[in-house]
Amino acid sequence: MKSVEHSEYLPDTEAGHSLFRERLIAKIQQHRDFKALPHEIQSSFFERLAELTLFGTNNCSVETHSSRIRKLEKLADSYRRVANSIALLSEIDELLLDDAFQHSMPLQQQKKLMRQLAAQVDELIGGMRQTSTSTSERILLRLQGASLLKQLGKLGVACKINNDFQKITQTDAVLSEETEQAQRFLPDLSQSMALAMLCTMLVLFNSGQVVEWSYCRRLLLEGEKALRQAAD
């Protein structure tokens, strides 16, 4: 098993925070979308980013996801990724795999099953979010996300998050389960992420909020929905 020392996850400690911020800033500076920004924006980018605030953080909780919902979302995403990967196979590779594993379910049936399972998990998550608390949290999240996207837009940062999928190996999942109760970890910055995601992480970090990949992504998604609705 990969040890914590050799993983890309930094501990949620003072030393971990310092190194995380350093790596996060470096990753933003190395991002191709950042390099494409005008020089005058780049020169004052981090000062202006440090001034950004999230609507409602002074009197509202930012950590909206329960542990159960986060894990269910990751499960549904995993089901969808497997189904999409099967769909990308060539016909000959699919035939070869089906022939090699004749005692298992054919790939087309597995693809259908994965999508059904993802839909069932999504339905379960939807039911869990029907409470009044979840509704108010979603409204707050949309307000915060929309406000953040508007502010990032002024810095030339577009809301591109479609390809932001955290790659979680089985080893990482086991490691997370074993260490969840003992110690929190900051997000893995070795993954490929859009500039908007990286900036959101830094804004949350600067404001002393919880920095979590799934929360940052949902914040941007909800904000994007709010802006689209406002434009209609």
Image (cartoon, rainbow, N blue to C red):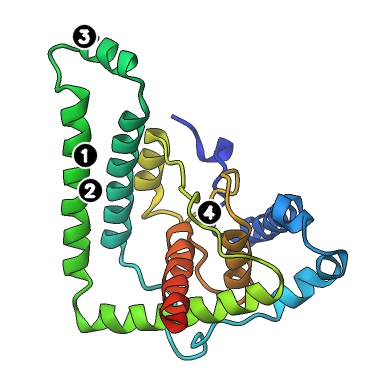
Mark sitting on residue 187 = 4
Residue bearing the label numbered 3 = 99
Of label 2 and label 4, which has the lower sequence position?
2
User: Disc 2 on helix, strand or loop?
Assistant: helix
The amino acid type found where label 1 is placed reads Met
Across and down, in percent, residue 55 comes to 52, 86
User: Disc 4 on helix, strand or loop?
Assistant: loop
The amino acid type found where label 2 is placed reads Ala
Which residue shows up at 50% across the image and 51% down it?
Answer: 164
**Image marks 1 and 2: residues in contact by CB distance under 8 Å:** yes
Across and down, in percent, residue 167 comes to 46, 41
Of label 3 and label 4, which has the lower sequence position?
3
Mark sitting on residue 118 = 2
Measure the alpha-carbon separation of dots 1 and 4. Answer: 27 Å
The amino acid type found where label 4 is placed reads Pro
Question: Looking at the figure, which quarter contains the N terminus?
Answer: top left
Residue bearing the label numbered 1 = 114
